[in-house]
Image (spheres, coloured by chain):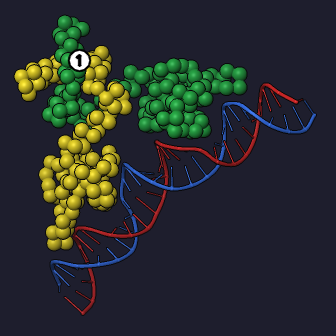
Chain colours: A yellow, B green, C blue, D red
DNA sequence: CACTTTCGTTTACACGTGTAATCTTCTAAT
DNA sequence: ATTAGAAGATTACACGTGTAAACGAAAGTG
């Protein structure tokens, strides 16, 4: 549940929790690595905001907190992507694919994957 | 061109300009209708921000300005959607479709459209 | 010409976000 | 017990965004 949505930076933290949980702020920071370029303090801020938004839960473990996701990854994916489809493509998915195709953004692999997918759907999923 | 990206509200103004251009602030406001619930002043603010971002151009027509898009709709669509794909689905499109399928978000029409599309691609477009 | 209407320009202001630093409070070690 | 180090909590702060209102200039009206 939890209706409020999550910012870009917050979602990077969630990604780590979805990969592995529960985790401490420290370990999330490490998992993000220097690629993110964040201080631990930043990760903590984000975690607190996620707490307020009800997207994660924290359990005290000694002196530390262990965080785990409440918001489900699948739900988030769906929210984000159907939001985009609604805003840009009239809520439908085919126009998106068509757009990519028209702009040569579909690789051979994409096409292959899509074909297989449709086949599976046809076969009753 | 113009790298800076456009906010949600700004994009609604752009949508109108992409539909019809050039247009005055006033006519954009009317076209948006009460659905948007914006004052004309708000539309003007957004237009000015779009100007600063280089997404639109304005030509004086008597006492008014006529605005027209510089940023192309196709480019914007591509930016937005490949951004999302990158952030959520490893940059590939098939996983997005798969996700929708798994969550029963593909209508019969979607499936039909996708199949036709793939057929067209196969036939060398 | 003075006044009103109409545009555009400038200024406003709260809220979310990115990105921490600092303060506070425990716990652990000497 | 005192003190240092670690973890969380509080505070900060600039920038973008949504959403205008206020101000100023120009043009039309009487």
Q: Is residue A57 visible?
A: yes
Q: Is residue B31 left or right of residue B61?
A: left
Q: Is residue B95 visible?
A: no
Q: Is residue A7 left or right of residue D7?
A: right
The image quadrant that residue A55 belongs to is bottom left
| Residue B84 drawn above or below residue D22 | above
Provide residue C20's location: percent of width, then percent of height: 36, 58
Provide residue B42's location: percent of width, then percent of height: 56, 39
| Residue B100 drawn above or below residue B118 | below
Residue closest to the far top:
B123
Q: How packed is label 1: few (under 14 Cα within 10 Å), some, or many (20 or more)?
A: some
Provide residue A2's location: percent of width, then percent of height: 27, 52
Identify the residue at horizontal 15%, vertical 69% (top origin): A61
Q: Nearer the viewer, residue D13 or B81?
A: B81
Q: Is residue B81 left or right of residue B49?
A: left
Q: Is residue A116 left or right of residue A37?
A: left
Q: Quadrant of the C terminus of chain A?
A: top left
Identify the residue at horizontal 47%, vertical 21% (top origin): B18
Residue closest to the far left:
A123
Question: Chain under label 1?
Answer: B
| Residue A3 drawn above or below residue B36 | below
| Residue B84 drawn above or below residue C23 | above
Provide residue A25's location: percent of width, then percent of height: 22, 60
Identify the residue at horizontal 31%, vertical 17% (top origin): A103
Number of marks in picture: 1
Q: Which residue is mark 1?
A: B113
Identify the residue at horizontal 21%, vertical 34% (top origin): B89
Q: Which SS class for mark 1? A: helix
């Amino acid at each position: 549940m939890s209706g409020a949505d999550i910012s870009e930076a917050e979602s990077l933290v969630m990604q780590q929790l979805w990969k592995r949980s529960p985790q401490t702020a420290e370990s999330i920071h490490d998992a993000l690595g220097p690629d993110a370029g964040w201080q631990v303090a930043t990760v903590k801020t984000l975690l607190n905001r996620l707490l307020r938004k009800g997207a994660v839960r924290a359990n005290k473990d000694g002196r530390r907190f262990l965080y785990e996701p409440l918001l489900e990854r699948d739900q988030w994916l769906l929210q984000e992507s159907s939001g985009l489809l609604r805003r840009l493509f009239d809520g439908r998915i085919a126009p998106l694919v068509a757009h990519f195709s028209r702009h040569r953004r579909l690789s051979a692999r994409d096409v292959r994957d899509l074909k297989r997918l449709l086949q599976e759907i046809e076969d009753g999923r």
